Image (cartoon, grey):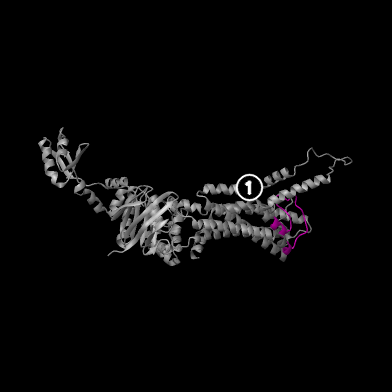
Amino acid sequence: MTEKVIETTLLTKRYGDFTAVDQLNMTVDEGEIFGFLGPNGAGKTTTILMLMGLSVPTSGTGVVAGYDIVDESREVRKVASILPEYSSLYGDLTAYENLDYIGRLNDLSKAEGEERTNEMLKIVGMSKWKDSKVESFSRGMKQRVGIAAALIKQPKVIFLDEPTLGLDPVGTKEIRELILRLNREQGLTVVMASHLLHEIQITCSRVGIINKGRMVVTETIENLTKEMTGSEDRRVEFKLSEVPSGLIGDLEAIESVKSVTQENDRLYVYAGVESDFMVSKTVVEHGAVILLMRPREYTLEEIFMKYYTEG
Amino acid sequence: MAGTLTVAAKEIRDQLGSKRFLILFGLVLLLSSLAAYQGVDFIRNNQDAGFAYIFSGARFGFSFIQIMVFFGPLLGLTMGFDAINKERTAGTLSVVLSQPIFRDSVINGKFIAGAAALATLTLGTIGITCGLTIPMLGFGPTAEEAAKIAIMTLLTIVYLVFWLSLGILYSVLTKKTSTSILSSIATWLTFAIVISILASVVANVLVPLPGGTFRAGEGDQGGFRISPEFTETMQRRAAIQSNIQKISPTNLYSDAASDILGVQSGFGRGFQQFERTLTLGEALAANWANIAALAVGLVICFAASYMMFLRSEIRPGD
């Protein structure tokens, strides 16, 4: 039985008339990498700010690592860390000084702070630049130091707000591997807000899709894909030598086929497994040769578009 | 408390090492040395003047007190105008506040650091000024004069910290540092220049100058004969002007500091007058209201920024 590290109940935040987060329910299990997905302005950042005690909910409750986010905010901040969306370090201080300051704010002794600072800089691979000023770093380096700063307090949960935004592919890969490694080696629970679908897909074990402040769906990526690729929405991709006139009409006439669409040289047949035989037979009867035939899984993009537009 | 001290320690290091502080310190030190030279000149030309006059006496140009009247608002505001909003814009505020500290540690720490920087500046300037002038004069302050200088130093620090807390208030009220720096400059100009212009305009509206030009009276060979009515008019105008300027913190400071040191100076008081030097006790008795007003202003500004900061939230995009 895994323990819930985060649980919110009807969490709501209003700014005047605007409802940024609307009766949000979410749970994150210990040791999970939870992808918090949604378009810009969906309420991801606001939710994280509330969970960290930086913003006060208008209504509803939240619990992080067993502590109430409003009444026990300081306890929450002892066990949870945040890497904000934009670089959040003092540019005029060195990497070491930045981490040392955060360590002191966490009541670490000088020796403890020094030890952890060096350890964290090593983990993120920034030991070499520890005495350089942060303003001279690239965005990727800043993010790595930012993660090190977030790790100083040895948190149970870390909130990453768009951790790879604006990074080049190499930087993105480094950050992703770092997150996965921390999760694997230290059992760190990670909540990662992003609108980069691919990033979420390859990093996260479970995703929550938020749109207009509401949690639309929470599911493992595998199940999400499966759900849409189930018999109801199954589609088969064909590449044919030619598309004879009348073929599409005849295919649509097959009882179990829902619809047929043509995109460039591909034909997509929306139908269950049972109709595969009849479909291919019909194609051949029209004198076309099947060059390729495969059930086509939905891309994440298509899944998310579905939920975004539904919301 | 640990959080407050940690923030304060970091901020003091930042402040004392900043170009901003070094430039201001250099400027004040330069001007104060020039003022001290004038103070020495003043003392040499007045038999009754004691050592304390190096900070208040000037036969030409500015005394130390007048420098503080003019630059004091700038010094204090400069140390505080971006205290909070700069960190908000840089995103560092959310990281600091996401550590297990009490929220007020941030604003308390910054206030302490700013006050410490201003105290350093004041003590450094006054110390160096004394060090320069004692050899020039060949004598140092008596015990009472030393006490007067010490009290004046404290008063100067309170006065500067008042402007600091107003600056911090601006940094809490505004989102952008460009807005708070403009507010600070506007405030400085208002109290350094605009208020005296305003006072004379108001005085002129209430008590207009008599028409015509000054005429030499009969029998006065080339001199002006000033009628008692004219003198009265001018006195009423001066009274209105000085009452309007009384609301200015710069004036509260210069009145109190001048009385403590012994020479009336400051804008709106007209010519330097050499009066009977008050004892420290007399000066404090006559000026306790001024000093209290400055302290109350300081507390109000800080309390307002404190409460607004505690109530403010981090919003997406901060």
In the picture, measured across the screen, residue B190 lies left or right of residue A172, that is: right
Residue B234 point in image, percent of width and height: 77, 46
Furthest-top residue in this view = A245
* B206 or B30, nearer to the observer: B206
Up-down: is A281 above or below B9? above
Alpha-carbon neighbours of circle 1 within 10 Å: few (<14), some, or many (≥20)? some
Quarter of the image where one finds residue B55:
bottom right
In the picture, measured across the screen, residue B126 lies left or right of residue A166, that is: right
Is residue B274 inside the magenta stretch?
yes
In the picture, measured across the screen, residue A264 lies left or right of residue B271, that is: left
* B139 or B318, nearer to the observer: B318
User: Quick one: SS at disc 1?
Assistant: helix
Up-down: is A175 above or below B221? below
* B139 or B279, nearer to the observer: B279
Q: Residue at x 66, y 57 (%)?
A: B129
Residue under circle 1? Answer: B190
Identify which amino acid the numbered label 1 is placed on.
Thr
Which residues are the magenta region?
Answer: B255-282
Is residue B310 at least partly visible in the picture? yes
Is residue B14 inside the magenta stretch?
no
Q: Main secondary structure of the magenta part?
A: loop
Residue A290 point in image, percent of width and height: 13, 39
Residue B47 point in image, percent of width and height: 79, 58
Chain of the residue displaying label 1: B
Residue A167 point in image, percent of width and height: 36, 48
Is residue B55 at least partly visible in the picture? no
Q: Residue at x 75, y 54 (%)?
A: B42
